[in-house]
Image: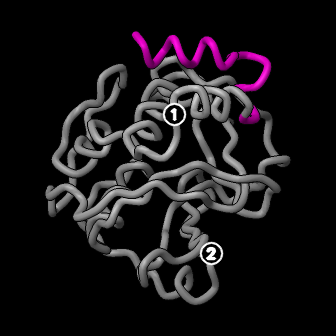
Amino acid sequence: MHTSRLRCYLAGGRPPGASRTYPGCRDPRMPLRSVAVDLPGSVYFATESPVWTGGRAFYDPDAPGRVLARAHLVTTAQFADIAAQEMYAPPGHDLDLTQVLTEGRARLGPGRYETLVRPGELDGFPVLTFTAPWLMGDVKWTQPSAGYLRHLAAGLLEAGAWDLASVAAYLADLPGAAGHWTAAEVRLLVAD
């Protein structure tokens, strides 16, 4: 969600605090628009990120709750290249979006971030994201790292729809972060 991190996916580079350099997309242009969105479901942290250490954020559209997010208007090729980079695959191959656009979900593989989800539409465009094939309650939740939370918070704040107190409380309450991070600690991450 954070612009500086998204820029690394699009143009290539390493986000501050990450241990991985991304190759970038075939089309490195920044999104035409970026807006704040509320999605149905929940975000939770699970597995272990080799890039950030700690838990990774996953989206369960079927879980109860509300997800604070940011939608970026990118091309289908950019979406495919961003997804490939998250799947540890080389960018440069288009995705068949037929199933996700018609059924709302498409499983491309068994791993994390290999399931495409369409939680809705925005201004006539489909809202697409990728997540794990499992549900929030099917895996052990994992505490996210400070660097990862900092990027998530910064991205939500850049959207301009929520203030720091709301973003910090939201992130600290997510499964995996709850009980390990307080809203006050998340606020301090952003201040640093």
The reply to whether dot 1 and dot 2 touch (C-beta < 8 Å) is no
Q: What residue sits 55% from the left and 85% below the top?
A: 99
Identify the image quadrant of residue 118: bottom right
Q: Which residues are magenta?
A: 174-192
**Kind of residue sitting beneath label 1:** Asp
Q: What residue sits 57% from the left and 33% below the top?
A: 167
Q: Is residue 46 above or below residue 168?
A: below
Disc 1 designates what residue? 163
Disc 2 designates what residue? 105
Q: What residue sits 48% from the left and 27% below the top?
A: 148
Q: Residues within 10 Å of mark 2 (few under 14, many from 20)?
A: many
Q: Is residue 19 above or below residue 77?
A: above
Please state the total of marks drawn on the protein image: 2
* First of labels 1, 2 by sequence position: 2
Q: Nearer the viewer, residue 90 or 102?
A: 102
Q: Position of residue 3 (x, y in %)?
A: 30, 42
Q: Is residue 17 left or right of residue 41?
A: left
Q: What SS does tag 1 mark?
A: loop
**Kind of residue sitting beneath label 2:** Arg
Residue 186 shown in magenta: yes
Residue 45 shown in magenta: no
Report the quarter where the C terminus lies: top left
Q: Nearer the viewer, residue 153 or 75?
A: 153
Q: Is residue 19 above or below residue 71?
A: above
Q: Look at the image and name its color scheme.
A: one colour
Q: Position of residue 24 (x, y in %)?
A: 21, 49
Q: Is residue 144 left or right of residue 80?
A: right
The mark found on residue 48 in the picture is: none
Q: Give me the C-alpha separation between circle 1 and circle 2.
A: 32 Å
